[in-house]
Image: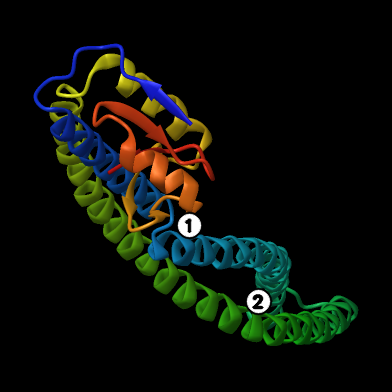
Amino acid sequence: MTEQESGEAAGSTGDVFSTLLEVQDHDTTIDQLRHRRSALPEQAELAGVEGRLSILENRATVVQTVRDELGVRQAALEEQIDVTRARRTELERRMFGGQVSAARDLQAMDEEVKHLAHHISELEDREIEIMEELEPIDTDLSAVSTERDALRSDRARLQGAIASAVEGIDADIVTQSADRVAAAAAVPADLLARYERLRTVLAGTGAARLVGGSCSGCHLTLPAMEMDRIRKAPPDEVILCDQCGRILVR
Protein backbone atom coordinates (compact mmCIF):
# COMPACT_ATOMS: atom_id res chain seq x y z
CA MET A 1 0.00 0.00 0.00
CA THR A 2 1.35 3.47 -0.96
CA GLU A 3 0.26 7.09 -0.65
CA GLN A 4 1.91 10.11 -2.35
CA GLU A 5 2.65 12.91 0.10
CA SER A 6 0.61 15.96 -0.88
CA GLY A 7 2.29 18.46 1.47
CA GLU A 8 5.58 20.14 0.87
CA ALA A 9 8.32 18.45 2.89
CA ALA A 10 10.79 20.50 4.90
CA GLY A 11 14.27 19.56 3.71
CA SER A 12 14.99 16.45 1.67
CA THR A 13 12.53 13.55 1.52
CA GLY A 14 14.97 11.27 3.33
CA ASP A 15 15.38 13.83 6.08
CA VAL A 16 11.60 14.08 6.47
CA PHE A 17 11.15 10.37 7.00
CA SER A 18 14.20 10.17 9.26
CA THR A 19 12.77 13.03 11.28
CA LEU A 20 9.45 11.17 11.48
CA LEU A 21 11.35 8.29 13.05
CA GLU A 22 12.82 10.76 15.54
CA VAL A 23 9.28 11.80 16.43
CA GLN A 24 8.40 8.12 16.85
CA ASP A 25 11.43 7.57 19.08
CA HIS A 26 10.41 10.48 21.29
CA ASP A 27 6.81 9.23 21.45
CA THR A 28 8.00 5.73 22.36
CA THR A 29 10.27 7.09 25.07
CA ILE A 30 7.47 9.28 26.46
CA ASP A 31 5.10 6.29 26.52
CA GLN A 32 7.73 4.23 28.31
CA LEU A 33 8.32 6.98 30.86
CA ARG A 34 4.59 7.30 31.53
CA HIS A 35 4.29 3.55 31.98
CA ARG A 36 7.30 3.57 34.28
CA ARG A 37 5.75 6.36 36.32
CA SER A 38 2.47 4.45 36.71
CA ALA A 39 4.19 1.16 37.57
CA LEU A 40 6.88 2.16 40.04
CA PRO A 41 7.77 -0.81 42.27
CA GLU A 42 7.53 1.50 45.27
CA GLN A 43 3.86 2.09 44.45
CA ALA A 44 3.04 -1.60 44.77
CA GLU A 45 5.06 -1.75 47.98
CA LEU A 46 3.25 1.34 49.29
CA ALA A 47 -0.13 -0.25 48.53
CA GLY A 48 0.92 -3.28 50.57
CA VAL A 49 2.08 -1.13 53.47
CA GLU A 50 -1.14 0.91 53.44
CA GLY A 51 -3.19 -2.30 53.34
CA ARG A 52 -1.36 -3.71 56.37
CA LEU A 53 -1.63 -0.35 58.12
CA SER A 54 -5.39 -0.24 57.53
CA ILE A 55 -5.80 -3.74 58.99
CA LEU A 56 -3.65 -2.75 61.95
CA GLU A 57 -5.63 0.44 62.53
CA ASN A 58 -8.89 -1.54 62.57
CA ARG A 59 -7.40 -4.06 64.96
CA ALA A 60 -6.14 -1.26 67.23
CA THR A 61 -9.62 0.29 67.26
CA VAL A 62 -11.26 -2.99 68.29
CA VAL A 63 -8.68 -3.75 70.99
CA GLN A 64 -8.78 -0.17 72.31
CA THR A 65 -12.58 -0.35 72.56
CA VAL A 66 -12.30 -3.48 74.72
CA ARG A 67 -9.59 -1.83 76.79
CA ASP A 68 -11.70 1.30 77.30
CA GLU A 69 -14.68 -0.76 78.44
CA LEU A 70 -12.52 -2.60 80.97
CA GLY A 71 -11.03 0.72 82.04
CA VAL A 72 -14.49 2.10 82.75
CA ARG A 73 -15.32 -0.98 84.84
CA GLN A 74 -12.04 -0.68 86.71
CA ALA A 75 -12.62 3.01 87.43
CA ALA A 76 -16.12 2.24 88.73
CA LEU A 77 -14.75 -0.46 91.04
CA GLU A 78 -12.03 1.87 92.34
CA GLU A 79 -14.68 4.49 93.08
CA GLN A 80 -16.77 1.92 94.97
CA ILE A 81 -13.71 0.76 96.91
CA ASP A 82 -12.83 4.34 97.86
CA VAL A 83 -16.39 5.06 99.02
CA THR A 84 -16.56 1.81 100.99
CA ARG A 85 -13.17 2.40 102.62
CA ALA A 86 -14.19 5.91 103.57
CA ARG A 87 -17.35 4.56 105.20
CA ARG A 88 -15.36 1.92 107.11
CA THR A 89 -12.81 4.50 108.25
CA GLU A 90 -15.56 6.78 109.49
CA LEU A 91 -17.20 3.96 111.42
CA GLU A 92 -13.91 2.93 113.00
CA ARG A 93 -13.17 6.52 113.94
CA ARG A 94 -16.52 6.77 115.72
CA MET A 95 -16.15 3.36 117.37
CA PHE A 96 -12.69 3.99 118.77
CA GLY A 97 -13.09 7.73 119.33
CA GLY A 98 -15.46 7.38 122.24
CA GLN A 99 -18.33 9.00 120.41
CA VAL A 100 -20.51 5.88 120.74
CA SER A 101 -20.93 4.21 124.15
CA ALA A 102 -23.99 2.04 123.78
CA ALA A 103 -23.02 -1.63 123.43
CA ARG A 104 -25.81 -2.31 120.96
CA ASP A 105 -24.69 0.54 118.72
CA LEU A 106 -21.05 -0.53 118.92
CA GLN A 107 -22.02 -4.08 118.01
CA ALA A 108 -24.03 -2.90 115.01
CA MET A 109 -21.16 -0.70 113.86
CA ASP A 110 -18.71 -3.54 114.29
CA GLU A 111 -20.91 -5.80 112.17
CA GLU A 112 -21.11 -3.12 109.47
CA VAL A 113 -17.29 -2.67 109.53
CA LYS A 114 -16.86 -6.40 109.01
CA HIS A 115 -19.40 -6.38 106.18
CA LEU A 116 -17.63 -3.41 104.56
CA ALA A 117 -14.25 -5.15 104.86
CA HIS A 118 -15.69 -8.22 103.16
CA HIS A 119 -17.26 -6.06 100.41
CA ILE A 120 -13.94 -4.25 99.87
CA SER A 121 -12.22 -7.61 99.51
CA GLU A 122 -14.76 -8.70 96.92
CA LEU A 123 -14.39 -5.42 94.99
CA GLU A 124 -10.59 -5.71 95.06
CA ASP A 125 -10.80 -9.29 93.77
CA ARG A 126 -12.95 -8.11 90.88
CA GLU A 127 -10.50 -5.29 90.21
CA ILE A 128 -7.62 -7.77 90.11
CA GLU A 129 -9.54 -9.85 87.58
CA ILE A 130 -9.96 -6.81 85.38
CA MET A 131 -6.28 -5.93 85.76
CA GLU A 132 -5.40 -9.48 84.68
CA GLU A 133 -7.63 -9.03 81.62
CA LEU A 134 -6.00 -5.68 80.87
CA GLU A 135 -2.42 -6.98 80.99
CA PRO A 136 -2.44 -8.95 77.68
CA ILE A 137 -4.57 -6.24 76.07
CA ASP A 138 -2.06 -3.55 77.00
CA THR A 139 0.74 -5.77 75.71
CA ASP A 140 -1.15 -6.21 72.45
CA LEU A 141 -1.77 -2.47 72.14
CA SER A 142 1.90 -1.77 72.72
CA ALA A 143 2.88 -4.24 70.00
CA VAL A 144 0.30 -2.75 67.64
CA SER A 145 1.62 0.74 68.35
CA THR A 146 5.20 -0.34 67.62
CA GLU A 147 4.21 -2.05 64.37
CA ARG A 148 2.03 0.88 63.36
CA ASP A 149 4.90 3.31 63.88
CA ALA A 150 7.15 1.12 61.73
CA LEU A 151 4.55 0.94 58.96
CA ARG A 152 4.00 4.69 59.07
CA SER A 153 7.73 5.17 58.75
CA ASP A 154 7.79 2.82 55.75
CA ARG A 155 4.87 4.69 54.22
CA ALA A 156 6.63 8.02 54.57
CA ARG A 157 9.83 6.58 53.09
CA LEU A 158 8.00 5.09 50.12
CA GLN A 159 5.97 8.24 49.51
CA GLY A 160 9.22 10.20 49.44
CA ALA A 161 10.83 7.73 47.04
CA ILE A 162 7.79 7.82 44.75
CA ALA A 163 7.68 11.62 44.76
CA SER A 164 11.37 11.77 43.90
CA ALA A 165 11.04 9.19 41.11
CA VAL A 166 7.97 10.89 39.65
CA GLU A 167 9.73 14.24 39.71
CA GLY A 168 12.66 12.80 37.75
CA ILE A 169 10.41 11.00 35.27
CA ASP A 170 8.26 14.09 34.73
CA ALA A 171 11.39 16.12 34.04
CA ASP A 172 12.43 13.56 31.41
CA ILE A 173 8.95 13.68 29.87
CA VAL A 174 9.16 17.47 29.62
CA THR A 175 12.54 17.20 27.88
CA GLN A 176 11.36 14.48 25.52
CA SER A 177 8.18 16.40 24.75
CA ALA A 178 10.12 19.54 23.88
CA ASP A 179 12.44 17.56 21.60
CA ARG A 180 9.42 15.87 20.07
CA VAL A 181 7.78 19.21 19.28
CA ALA A 182 10.98 20.42 17.62
CA ALA A 183 11.25 17.27 15.50
CA ALA A 184 7.56 17.26 14.57
CA ALA A 185 7.85 20.83 13.29
CA ALA A 186 10.07 19.55 10.48
CA VAL A 187 7.52 16.94 9.33
CA PRO A 188 4.79 17.94 6.82
CA ALA A 189 1.44 18.35 8.52
CA ASP A 190 -0.39 15.72 6.45
CA LEU A 191 2.32 13.11 7.03
CA LEU A 192 2.37 13.90 10.74
CA ALA A 193 -1.42 13.65 10.93
CA ARG A 194 -1.35 10.25 9.23
CA TYR A 195 1.36 9.11 11.61
CA GLU A 196 -0.72 10.26 14.61
CA ARG A 197 -3.77 8.35 13.37
CA LEU A 198 -1.74 5.18 12.88
CA ARG A 199 -0.06 5.55 16.26
CA THR A 200 -3.45 5.73 17.94
CA VAL A 201 -4.62 2.38 16.54
CA LEU A 202 -1.28 0.55 16.39
CA ALA A 203 -0.19 0.41 20.01
CA GLY A 204 1.68 3.70 19.92
CA THR A 205 3.87 2.94 16.89
CA GLY A 206 2.88 4.73 13.70
CA ALA A 207 6.22 4.58 11.89
CA ALA A 208 8.88 1.89 11.74
CA ARG A 209 12.14 1.36 9.91
CA LEU A 210 12.37 -1.18 7.14
CA VAL A 211 15.32 -3.37 8.08
CA GLY A 212 16.35 -5.80 5.38
CA GLY A 213 13.05 -7.26 4.34
CA SER A 214 11.28 -6.86 7.69
CA CYS A 215 9.18 -4.18 9.34
CA SER A 216 10.69 -3.22 12.69
CA GLY A 217 7.19 -2.39 13.93
CA CYS A 218 5.53 -5.78 13.52
CA HIS A 219 8.77 -7.75 12.92
CA LEU A 220 7.21 -9.58 9.99
CA THR A 221 8.99 -10.22 6.71
CA LEU A 222 7.47 -8.54 3.68
CA PRO A 223 6.82 -10.65 0.56
CA ALA A 224 9.51 -10.48 -2.13
CA MET A 225 7.09 -8.89 -4.60
CA GLU A 226 6.27 -6.14 -2.12
CA MET A 227 9.95 -5.53 -1.45
CA ASP A 228 10.58 -5.21 -5.17
CA ARG A 229 7.79 -2.68 -5.47
CA ILE A 230 9.16 -0.69 -2.53
CA ARG A 231 12.63 -0.54 -4.07
CA LYS A 232 11.16 0.88 -7.29
CA ALA A 233 8.91 3.42 -5.52
CA PRO A 234 9.84 7.13 -5.66
CA PRO A 235 11.72 8.33 -2.55
CA ASP A 236 8.93 10.77 -1.63
CA GLU A 237 6.24 8.09 -1.66
CA VAL A 238 4.75 7.07 1.68
CA ILE A 239 5.16 3.32 2.02
CA LEU A 240 2.98 1.39 4.42
CA CYS A 241 3.78 -2.06 5.75
CA ASP A 242 1.34 -4.46 4.09
CA GLN A 243 1.43 -6.59 7.28
CA CYS A 244 0.62 -4.01 9.97
CA GLY A 245 -0.11 -0.75 8.13
CA ARG A 246 2.67 1.32 9.73
CA ILE A 247 4.62 3.91 7.76
CA LEU A 248 7.84 2.29 6.65
CA VAL A 249 10.99 4.37 6.65
CA ARG A 250 13.49 3.10 4.09
Q: What's the image's color scheme?
A: rainbow
Element class at badge 2: helix
Q: Is residue 230 left or right of residue 118?
A: left
At x 46%, y 67%, the residue is 45
Q: Are marks 2 and 1 in contact (CB under 8 Å)?
A: no
Q: Give the quarter of the figure containing the C terminus.
A: top left
- Reading the image, the residue beneath label 1 is 221
* Residue at image location 52% in from the left, 41% down from the top: 242
Q: Which mark is in front, 2 or 1?
A: 1
Q: Nearer the viewer, residue 28 or 74?
A: 28
Give the Cα distance between marks 2 and 1: 105 Å
The amino acid type found where label 1 is placed reads Thr
In the picture shown, does residue 246 fall above or below 77?
A: above
In the image, 31: left or right of 99?
left
Task: Describe the element under mark 1 as helix, strand or loop.
Answer: loop
**Dot 2, how many residues are within 10 Å of its Cα: few (below 14), some (14-19), or many (20+)?**
some
What amino acid is at disc 2? Thr
Residue 159 appears anywhere in the view: yes
Q: Is residue 236 left or right of residue 204?
A: left
The foreground one among 47 and 128 is: 47
Using the rendered view, name the quadrant where residue 234 is placed. top left
What is the x, y in percent for residue 111?
Answer: 87, 83
Q: Which residue is mark 2?
A: 89
Report x, y in % for residue 18: 19, 39
First of labels 2, 1 by sequence position: 2
Q: Which mark is residue 183?
A: none
Q: Residue at x 49, y 66 (%)?
A: 49
The residue at the point 54 percent across, 45 percent down is: 243
